[in-house]
Image (cartoon, rainbow, N blue to C red):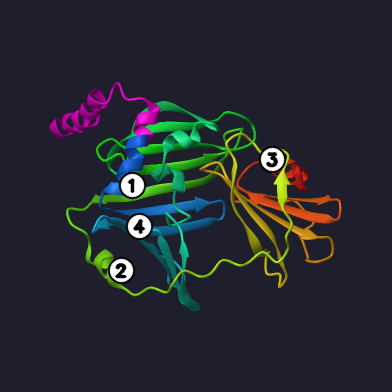
Amino acid sequence: MRLFLLALLVLHFPAMAQEDMSAKAWLENMSQALREQEYKISLIQLQADHIRPLVYIHGKIEDKEVAFLEHLNGPPKNAVRVGNTVTFIEHDQPAYSINASRIQGILPPAFAGDISSLESGYQFVLGGRSRLAGRPGQLVRIIPVDGFRYGYQVWLDMDTFLPLRYDMLTQDKQLLEQILVVELLVLDDVPAILNEAYKQPWPGVIAQPTRDAGDNWKFKWLPEGFNVLVKDSHRLMGSHEAVEYIALSDGIANISVYVARAGDAVMPEELVTRNGLSLATERIGNAEVVAVGKVPAETLSRIAKSITIE
C-alpha cells in the first residue's frame, strides 16, 4: 500500500506544479529539451507491417549538438549528427554526409525548432496524463486546422519534457505511425560514443545535384503553412533519368514533388497508400507530375494539379 501511495504522489506532484502550462508551452519546453539535454532513448517505431527498434543518443560538446541513431534489427545502419552535418553509415555502401539540422525518421525536425512556425497549420490542445516507459507523461494533441494534413499527438515526460510517445493519425483517427519510448535515460555526462563521433573525420557533405533544366515551377495552390524548401534535380524511384524535384513542408508533414517532361522519365501511374505514405500522379500539359508524402492523397492530387511554369 505504501508503494502504491508513493507512485500516486510521483504522478500527482508534477501535475500540480505544471497545472497552468499551455499546450504550446509544453511543446516549447520539449523543443528546448531535445536540443539542450543529454539523454539516451530506446524506442520502437511502428509503421503498419514494419517494427523498428532504435536507440537515439543526444548530447552537446563545445556547444555543438551531437547525436547518434542506431537501428537494432537487420544489417548495421547508423546515423551520426555533428552540428548541422548528418552522416549515414550502412554496411553495403560508403558513408556519406548531408546538411541537416536533425536526423530524419524519428521525430519531425520542427519538434526541436520554433513551435510557433507550426501554428498556421495546427492548433495545440492539452490532453490527459498517463504513465509511459515508467514515467508520468502529459498528452499534447497537434490538430490540423484543415483536412489537408494528418493530426498528431505526443506524450511528454513531465520531468524532462522529452517525448515518450508520438502518434500520426488520419482524419478518422486511424493510427498510421507510432513511436514508443521503452526506456529514457537522462545522462549526467556526454557518453563516450558521442565524444568519439565528434572527433571522427566524417566524409564531406555531398554536392547537391545541379538543375539541368531552367524550368521555374510554381504552385498556384498549397495548403496553409506549406513552403518550398528545396528545388533541384533528383532521381525518381530507381530511374536513371533526373527529374525536377521540389520539397515542401509545413514543419511536420513533408511532401516531395517530381516533374518530368512527358516521356523523358518513367513515372508511376497509380495512387497507393502504405504506412501513411500516399502518392498521386497527374498529367499537366506536356509534363508528368508525381507528389509523394504522408498527407491525404487528395491533398497530393490537388498540389500536383496546381503546378505551373513561369
In the figure, is residue 8 to the left or right of 236? Answer: left
Residue 216 in picture, x, y percent from top left: 72, 53
User: Residue drawn 86% across and 51% down?
Assistant: 285
Give the spatial CA distance, label 4 vs label 1: 11 Å
Residue extending farthest left: 2
In the figure, is residue 161 to the left or right of 149? Answer: left
Q: Which residue is mark 3?
A: 299
CB atoms at circles 2 and 4 under 8 Å apart?
A: no
Q: Which residue is mark 2?
A: 197
Q: Which residue is mark 4?
A: 56
Q: Which residue is mark 1?
A: 34
Q: Quick one: 285 or 78, which is closer to the camera?
A: 285
Residue 165 seen in the figure: yes
Give the spatial CA distance, label 3 vs label 1: 31 Å
Q: Main secondary structure of the magenta part?
A: helix
Lower sequence index among marks 4 and 1:
1
Q: Any mark on residue 164, and which?
A: none
**Which range of residues does the magenta coloring cover?**
1-27
